[in-house]
Amino acid sequence: MNFRLLAGSVLSYGYNHMIGNCPSRQIRMTYLKTYLAEVGVGTSVQMGCRFLNGRKVHLGDRNVVNFGCLFDGRHYQIRTGSDVSIGPEATILTLGHDPQSPEFSDKGGDVMIGDRVWIAYRAIILPGLTIGEGAVVGAGSVVTKDVEPYTIVGGVPARIIGIRNTHLNYSLNYSPFLL
């Protein structure tokens, strides 16, 4: 096993099993600022979130990542814009398997999430997708295709169920003390 892989595994384990459940937001965020590739100003990550290879996870400014989320940065990057709200227990995947491969080969890609995106409770974003600026992913949805800016998608698989106001002007500011 190479040193970088071992070090990354230790850092992931440390956060996912110890630091990530610490009730102090300040301790969690201090660790994440050294472990993740990028943590923007004003970003808050609640307890119980897990990161698989945090070195490929880039969180933009003023993101709110609710409890129990999973960020899979094993081989590909996850990048979020500013003012992104990710609901509890949402999952963002960058790697899976090709079901048509006789060798069960890996299949994946980067996940790009635009500014002011809202990903609701227990949504799942599959590998290699882009979620456009201002889009909303409904609770429990499984996103299998790119989501156009300012569209609202929901269901399994997610499909367009509405259009969002394009004149968004909010900035997220949520950093509870014990979450």
Image (spheres, rainbow, N blue to C red):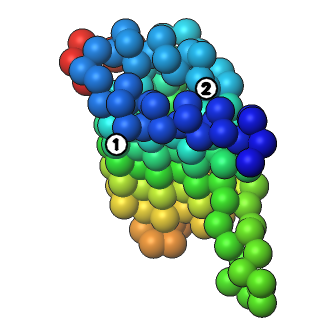
Q: CA distance from mark 2 to mark 1?
A: 17 Å
Q: Position of residue 137 (x, y in %)?
A: 47, 51
* Nearest to the observer: residue 96 or residue 161: 96
Three-letter amino acid code at the position of disc 1: Gly
**On the rendered structure, is 19 left or right of 60?**
left
- State the residue lying farthest toward the left: 178
| Above or below, 64 relative to 173 | below
* Nearest to the observer: residue 127 or residue 149: 127
| Above or below, 140 relative to 134 | below
Q: Residues within 10 Å of mark 2 (few under 14, many from 20)?
A: many
Q: Position of residue 101 (x, y in %)?
A: 77, 85
Precedes in sequence: disc 2 or disc 1: 2
Callout 2: SS: loop
At 41% from the left edge and 49% from the top edge, which residue is drawn? 90
At 73% from the left edge and 61% from the top edge, which residue is drawn? 108
* Nearest to the observer: residue 14 or residue 53: 14
* Nearest to the observer: residue 35 or residue 10: 10
Where residue 9 sits, quadrant-wise, is: top right
Three-letter amino acid code at the position of disc 2: Leu
Q: Residues within 10 Å of mark 1 (few under 14, many from 20)?
A: some
**On the rendered structure, is 117 left or right of 95?**
left
Q: Which residue is mark 2?
A: 36
Label annotation for residue 68: 1
